[in-house]
Image (tube, rainbow, N blue to C red):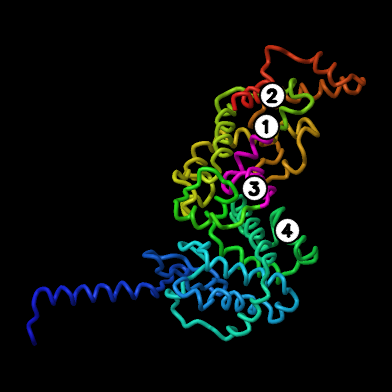
Amino acid sequence: MALVSTSEALVEVADLILSKIAAFSTTEISKRGRKYRFVNNKFQRIREEDKHLVINPDNLEDRVSIILAYGILSAILPDIFASHKDLCLIIVGVARALEENHWYEEENSSVVNIVSLKNSLDMAHAEEALEFAKNVTPDHLARGYNLLYCSKLNFLHTDHHVGSKLEGHYMREYVSKYFGDDALELPVVLLALKSFSHWANIKGLLYKLGVPHMDVDETLKTRFSTFPQPPQELADHVFDRFPSGSSKYSLVCKALDQIAQSKYARLIPYPQGALFDPQWAYDLCGDISRDPAKYHLRSKVKKLSPNPANLQELSQHWKHQLESLLLVVSLIVNTFPGISDDYLMQNARFPPFSDTLINKFEAYYKQLLEVANEIEDYESKDWAEDDIVLRMHKGHVVSFYDEIEKMNNRN
């Protein structure tokens, strides 16, 4: 055995280490039925791999994104290019734009760099895919960008891009506008959009939609400086709902506001005790409104915020206060009919009206019942609402109106 110098031995060891690291690019593991691949120096979960867009950013002239997007669509329905030509042109055209402009995300992504593929690429549709893509127009691209914006709004508010059905007010509105009302219920359209909607960079599009305080670096800002601006109605929709994972806090504040705005709110006594103090809920909702990215369910995983909230800790911290307020709301709306809209009260977070609920707050329920019965008595005598309030109002009793108005004035 020939002796080698120390420097030669070190080179051999370094080569061995590098070869093992290189092997990680195609290393896959399975854990509890879930598949993970080593990508970008970490293991990432692989979901619905047949719907992943493959790109080749180092050789853009190969137009791999077009070919793979075409193949994904072909697998959904062989004649999809004839029956849903514009939808396919949108998806194929935007796939290419994402690849060219680096408008995709690299971590935990549904976009895969060709260098990390374990198996060889299926190029069976290459020629027809490239020929088909010649029909892509600027209008197809514009429509595709708007559909991506709609999907990212869905993600912001529900943590789903499209959903098990075609979900989201604006997603349905734009699909209907582009492809007709029938498209809203077609499985082929749903499947195509479910694949397509995951390919664009979540953080980049939320940044373009105007979500504040995003954790966006200069590189991402530069890349998305050329991404078309969203329609104003989509940008405005950012704040119409709370981010996924925080809706229960919005729910309780909306319910309290509805009660406080009802016609007899000045007569409904507000429950006393620390558990019923709503200040925390209004403060938290105000902070969520100002910084929705911080409170998103996947803020940490997707690096949406530089300071993501720990939603589990938040939920545990306010658990008893939240439950108490929800119980009170349920008691009131079931004691004073018509005080809240049915849609709000259909939410499963509100406990059902029952003897158990009544017994838990027996003294307070008796107060509510006395007020409700007295109101009913005056109404049966055809008293006007204002007269009933003037007659029954007790200045020394803190009413629902007083307490919630105080919260809203602070915020």
Name the residue nearer the viewer: 213 or 312. 213
User: What is the magenta range?
Assistant: 231-257
The kind of secondary structure element at disc 4 is helix
Name the residue nearer the viewer: 380 or 49. 49
List x then y, in percent, for residue 375.
82, 22
Disc 1 marks a residue whose amino acid type is: Leu
Read off the residue under disc 1. 256
Disc 2 marks a residue whose amino acid type is: Phe
The CA distance from mark 4 to mark 1 is 34 Å
Quadrant containing the C terminus is top right
The CA distance from mark 2 to mark 1 is 8 Å
The kind of secondary structure element at disc 2 is helix
Read off the residue under disc 2. 400
Read off the residue under disc 3. 235
List x then y, in percent, for residue 61.
51, 77
Task: Give me the disc on residue 236.
Answer: none
Read off the residue under disc 4. 174
In the rendered image, residue 241 lying in the magenta stretch gets the answer: yes
**Badge 1: few (under 14), some or many (20 or more) residues near its Cα, within 10 Å?**
many
The answer to whether mark 2 and mark 1 are in CB contact below 8 A is yes
